Amino acid sequence: MSLSRTRAAKVIERCRELSRITDVPGETTRLFLSRATHAAHALLLSWMRQAGLETRTDDIGNVRGVRRSNASDTSTLLLFSHIDTVPNAGAFDGPLGVLLGLAVMEELGATELPFNIELIAFSEEEGIRFSFPFLSSTAAAGGITHDHLRRKDAAGISVEQALRDFGLNPERLGESCAFSPATFAALEVHIEQGPVLEAEDLSLAVVQSIIGQSRLRLRFEGQANHAGTTPMPLRRDALTAAAQWIVDVERFALDHKQLVATVGRIEALPGAVNVIPGTVELTLDVRHPSDDSRHAAVGVLLTKAQRAAELRGVQVKATVASEQKSVAMDATLAASLAAAAERAGYPGRTMFSGAGHDAMILAPHVPTIMLFVRSPGSLSHHPDEAAREENVEAAIAVVIEWVLGLRQGANDS
Ligand SMILES: [Zn+2]
């Protein structure tokens, strides 16, 4: 086995080792500041120290390691991803980016660079425990408020209390979590969690933008009535109106490239076998790389809902539950990362991310870029989530090529 393949195998083995540290035996479940998180931190810190990094845990629980440059310039390159998980998770969503970053540092060995490299393993990305995602990158970006600290988990423990129980100091969040103001670029490596790279038989792609999303709740209101005595033409069936509209949503998204639209939850009331459904509540999730196109699509879909309702004498009301703008990654870094991929012998494919990531929290504060690594079977948030050695090997090679290119850029400027 080649040295680079061996290094990729080690990244995968470490992800698997980390995945065995869990709060729930038999699966991988490691929520923010949980008991298992202590053990995961200890293991990660030991790996970082073996690699010669200066380590610490900041006051939101992010594990950090710095590779110091001998240069007088203290500018810093940031590599990051997260190590919390969803319940019953796989081994790679998050940890792959952290351990790949560590592998890059190990591979660089004694190579002198004119900048420091900091590796951050964010402690809370998925947002399971406090129903709030990206808490730890929000802390790194200086955005934690008292409202965040007062949020409570299912057991009634606040973020502030959970931090103290873990041995952290919420009063020091600002100073201990902020990334260095001398950070000139930030890279998150992450599994794709989708089928695009697998379909194109590619190892990796540069993420140019994290797409925006609109979430809405719709309520179709008809008339519940007897399923036996109400003739078909006299019904006001909220569920058939909603069903017709759901198919309209699918058709519309199929006809518009890059648009994805999903009705993910539906409830029909009163929900009895012999009663015509009088009320239907459902959700709509709409995503598109362009915010304008997304807003336009939502408008059209709501008009279609109105029409589907009117056809059956049903009323429909929609409320916006959340709106998230699309976040562009840094164009200069996207170009340099795609060029590094080409130099390393891989196509410089670019794509959008349909899922949210810590990168979109950092992007407004520091030039940020993401690299996606192929997801075999496109499975994620699932125990069978996987990563292949050849794809990880490609990603390590591309990141090293990119880092060495940044050195060149730094020398030129
Ligand atoms: Zn993730």
Image (spheres, rainbow, N blue to C red):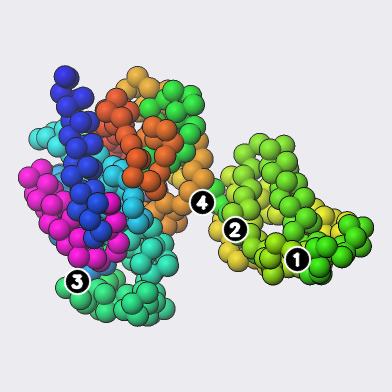
Discs 4, 2 touching: Cβ within 8 Å: no
- Give the residue pinned by disc 3: 166
Distance Cα–Cα, label 4 vs label 2: 26 Å
Q: Residue at x 17, y 34 (%)?
A: 10
Q: Nearer the viewer, mark 4 or mark 2?
A: 2
Relative to 249, 399 lies left or right:
left
Q: Residues within 10 Å of mark 4 (few under 14, many from 20)?
A: many
Q: Residues within 10 Å of mark 3 (few under 14, many from 20)?
A: some
User: Which three-letter amino acid code belongs to the residue tagged 2?
Assistant: Arg
The span shown in magenta is: 27-55
Q: Nearer the viewer, mark 1 or mark 4?
A: 1
Res 155 label: none
User: Which three-letter amino acid code belongs to the residue tagged 3?
Assistant: Phe
Q: Earlier in the sequence, mark 3 or mark 1?
A: 3
Whether ligand 1 has any atom under 8 Å from the Cβ at mark 1 is answered as: no
Say if the magenta span includes residue 50. yes
Image position, residue 386 (x, y; %) = 33, 36
- Give the residue pinned by disc 2: 265
Q: Nearer the viewer, mark 3 or mark 4?
A: 3
Query: On screen, 205 above or below 246?
Result: above
Of residues 169 and 75, the one drawn nearer to the viewer in this rendering: 169
